[in-house]
Amino acid sequence: MRLINRRPGGLGVLASAAVPFALALVLYVVASGIRLAENPDDKLLPGLASIGAAVERVAFEPDRRTGDYIFWTDTAASLQRLLTGVFVGAVVGLAVGVPNGLLPWFGAFASPAVRALSMIPPLAILPILFIVFGVGELAKVMLIVLGTAPFLMRDVEQRVRELPREQLIKAQTLDASSWQIALRVVLPQVFPRLVDGVRLSLGSAWLFLIAAEAIASTDGLGYRIFLVRRYLAMDVILPYVAWITVLAFLLDFGLRQLNRRCFPWYGA
Amino acid sequence: MIEVRNVWKRYPGKTVLENVRLRVEKNEFVTIVGASGCGKTTFLRMLLGEVEPCEGSIRIEGAPLVPEPRADRGVVFQRYSVFPHLTVLGNVLLGLDLGDAPWLGRTFGRRRARNVARAREMLARVGLERSAHNYPSELSGGMQQRLALAQTLITEPRILLLDEPFGALDPGIRSDMHELVRELHRELDLTVFMITHDIAEGFSLGSRLLVFDKPRVDPHEPDLYGATITFDLPVGHRRRADSIMDDINVKPGEEHAP
């Protein structure tokens, strides 16, 4: 049988997906073992036991100074910033993208500006955000909004333009007003596409979140990573990075399920 | 009555339609044939209000046509006529709900129950009552076009415009659809314009056949002159297609003769 026709079965799919992860783990344990054998105080590749102890310390014991379980307060603070920023970005994306794609006059007015806006590297204006909004929550959320909204505005505009011309004509022959067309024809069809756009922009949202937290914050996953870097605390950094990856995966998975459940017609 | 007075359509460097003149009485069933790119669809889009003529005018019952699609003219395209995000029932309900609820575009309570009843009646008329809660992507091509007809006719347009509605259907299903369209035309007192590539369909289905073609062709600049109605023939069930075929200069191999 040709290679292109050989497919893994149910268990084979799981097993082959697990192989790279297992391989990475084995590689890490071996490399860490070698380094620790040479120098028991090595901090670069801590053993699994010391990582476990560090997780135990940050996640399940109250912090000696503040009394918080810092792993969870960091997670809550970061997720709150991320979700607020992405939510506002999505709302702005919808509110600007739909009229941009649907109303020629609105598009002529706002579409070039949106294109120009999307060319500004958000991190380059982070100092401006800190100056304008202070170093509090608002500046960090605004960075995520400014990082995701221009992409979502352009994406939504494009999705609206992609709707077949026939559909808009058809709606007009049913006597739909522009408002009714936006509400009953365009919005419901653009919404699942917006969710897909949000899934794509989550990657950059995490980037902006961690950058903002690294520079000016007192809590959050990104803040913690950059804080403990000073002590070479790889035993904290590594589980934090793994946790961020898990969170990012769960958010993506959740949004995909949302689309599957709420819009059964989508992708059919 | 629909009156098309000396209508021209030009695009930069290209004339699509020239001097189209036509009078269509109420309740006529007009089929339109012609080679690809000869302006049939442009003509239909003018009747729809989507495209404006450069010269000339179109009048419906004496009033000039508003250059915007309106509810008095329903349309079914070859594809994309139904809304993929609405169920079969939702697609038919839409026209009624839009009329009843200018802000929300959907109805509730007793009014909704009344609209649902009307929509179900229309679905039963086109034979889709059992698929009411399916999405269009779950329907076959023929069923999707039945749905498109039901969706259009629920708002009771006086004119029905069909742009190759059965072009993508299998021959067996196509003849079922012919029967349906013929019945709907009779029952609902419609004036129908239908573009088709199937010349047999053009002869058998309508009461009048229009052939679009270019009367003048400049071989060095084929886009210089536009197309117009070169033949305007009364047709019908009785008249054999073969006898009319001789009248028309169909180029061999270009159209599929019956």
Image (cartoon, coloured by chain):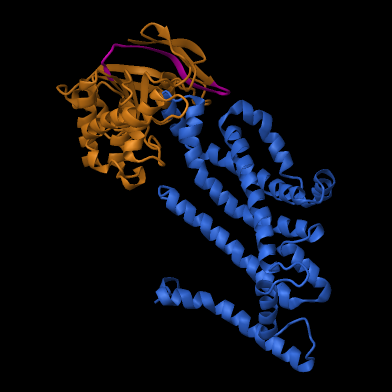
> From what the image shows, is residue B103 above or below residue A51?
above
Up/down of A122 relative to A229, above or below: above
Can residue A182 be seen in the rendering of this structure?
yes
Q: How many marks?
A: 0
B231 vs A186, left or right, is left
Residue B158 lies in the magenta-colored region: no
Residue B20 lies in the magenta stretch: yes
Please determine whether, in this image, residue A59 is positioned above or below residue A97: below
What residue do we see at 71% from left, 86% from top? A32
Report which quarter residue A171 is drawn in: top left
Q: In the rendering, at what x and y percent does residue A62 appear? A: 70, 71
Which hue is chain A drawn in?
blue
The main secondary structure of the magenta stretch is strand
Residue at 49 percent across and 18 percent down: it is B52
Left of B41 or right of it: where is A100?
right
The spot of residue A53 in percent (x, y) is 68, 81
Q: Residue at x 24, y 20 (%)?
A: B188
What residue span does the magenta drawing correspond to? B11-29
Of the 4 image quadrants, the one containing the C terminus of chain B is: top left
Nearest the eye: B155 or A138: A138
Residue at the outermost top position: B62
Q: Is residue B167 left or right of residue A110?
A: left
Q: Nearer the viewer, residue A194 or B142?
A: A194
Q: Residue A130 placed where, x, y %? A: 82, 49
Shown colour of chain B: orange
Q: Is residue A57 left or right of residue A253?
A: right
Q: What x and y, as percent, mark residue B216?
A: 44, 19
Q: Tell me if residue B251 can be seen.
A: no
